[in-house]
Amino acid sequence: MSDNALFMMLIIFGVNIVYVSFFTLRMIFTLKGRRYIAALISVVEIIIYIVGLGLVLDNLDQIQNLIAYAVGYGTGVIVGMKIEEKLALGYITVNVISSDPDIEFTRRLRDQGYGVTSWYAYGMEGDRLAMQILTPRKYELKLYETIRYIDPKAFIVAYEPKQIQGGFWAKQVKRGKIQHAQEEGKQEAL
């Protein structure tokens, strides 16, 4: 294989990674209701797509270009997912059911800056503590870790809310209370 053919494969591979990553970002922004950012990304996305597809179509007799296109597409899906994880846009609602209603679960989560609504519930095997916690997605994994630390047997269900209005969120989260509480916790741990 000549250097020119290898160079062409690398270009097609790279172009497709960038294209699919932009495609993923556009979908995320579309689903989050950020239409103008999604539209701007789509303009760049389609230019990249046309360039990559044109390179492959101009060289259809070169099977390695088609393979580079396909592998680049698959790699772009992974890269796009990683970018989405890092951006962590939006919020997540976490419902937690603790089998031990006597744990000071709610207070401990609130001390870390989370907004928690809790109530007593009754499950198949007795009393439970049910909680609903809303948090920015960037704190999602830390929240799960905290919940498992407080009650390793807690039942956890999470989902993304479509709309949030009023309550704790309107007052505290936008001011960075969770981040501030977690930073204080790190300093205390040192």
Image (tube, rainbow, N blue to C red):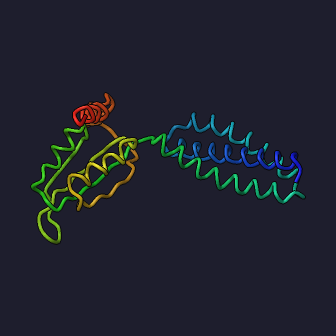
Q: In the image shown, does 97 or 108 lie closer to the viewer?
A: 108
- How many labels, in total? 0
Q: Could you say where residue 82 lies in the image, as x and y percent from the top left?
A: 53, 47
Residue in view at x 22 percent, y 33 percent: 188
Establish if 56 lies above or below 184. Answer: below
x%, y% of residue 121? 15, 60
Instruction: Name the residue: 13% across, 60% down.
Output: 100
Q: Image quadrant of residue 169?
A: top left
Task: Pinpoint residue 181: horizontal percent, then vertical percent.
Answer: 25, 33
Q: Say above or below: 76 vs 124.
A: above
Residue sitting farthest toward the top: 175
- Residue furthest to the front in view is 190
Q: Quadrant of residue 64?
A: bottom right
Front residue (pair 37, 151): 151
Q: Quadrant of the C terminus?
A: top left
Quarter of the picture containing the N terminus is bottom right
**In the displayed structure, does residue 125 sit left or right of residue 60?**
left
Residue in view at x 20 percent, y 40 percent: 110
Q: Position of residue 167 (x, y in %)?
A: 25, 37
Q: Is residue 117 left or right of residue 33?
A: left
Q: From the viewer's perspective, is 188 left or right of 13?
A: left
Report whether 174 appears left or right of 101.
right
Q: Is residue 188 above or below residue 159?
A: above
